[in-house]
Image: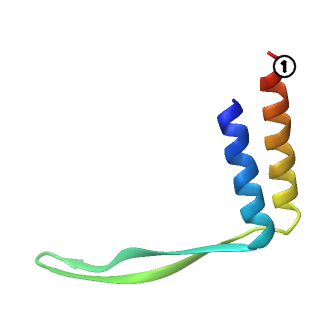
Amino acid sequence: MKIFGFVLIIAGIFMLFSNNFSFTTKENVVDAGPIQISANKKREITWPSYAGGVVIAAGVVLVAISKKK
C-alpha cells in the first residue's frame, strides 16, 4: 500500500501541472483479405484541475495508513 500511495502522489503532481494526456493508436480502416489499410488516430484524455489534488490526498492517506501498521 505504501508504494501505491507514492505512485498516487507522483501521478497527482503530474495531473496538477498537465490537464490532458494524449497518445496515438493504430486502427485498421480496411481489412479486405490481403489488403489492409490502417490509420493513426490521436486520442486525448482530459481531467479537471482539482483531480490532481484529490489523487495527491488519496496517496497521502494511503502512506499515512501504511505507516501506522
Colour pattern: rainbow
The N terminus sits in image quarter = top right
Q: Position of residue 61 (x, y in %)?
A: 85, 36
Q: How many marks?
A: 1
The residue sitting at 70% across, 55% down in the picture is 11
Nearer to me, 36 or 2: 2
The residue sitting at 71% across, 53% down in the picture is 10
Nearer to me, 33 or 41: 41
The answer to whether residue 26 is above or below residue 13 is below
Q: Where is residue 34 in the image (x, y as percent from the top left)?
A: 10, 77
Task: Answer with the quarter of the image where residue 36 lies.
Answer: bottom left
The answer to whether residue 39 is above or below residue 44 is below
Q: Which residue lies furthest to the left in this view?
A: 34
Nearer to me, 24 or 16: 16
Q: Where is residue 35 in the image (x, y as percent from the top left)?
A: 15, 82
Residue type at mark 1? Lys
- Residue position for label 1: 68
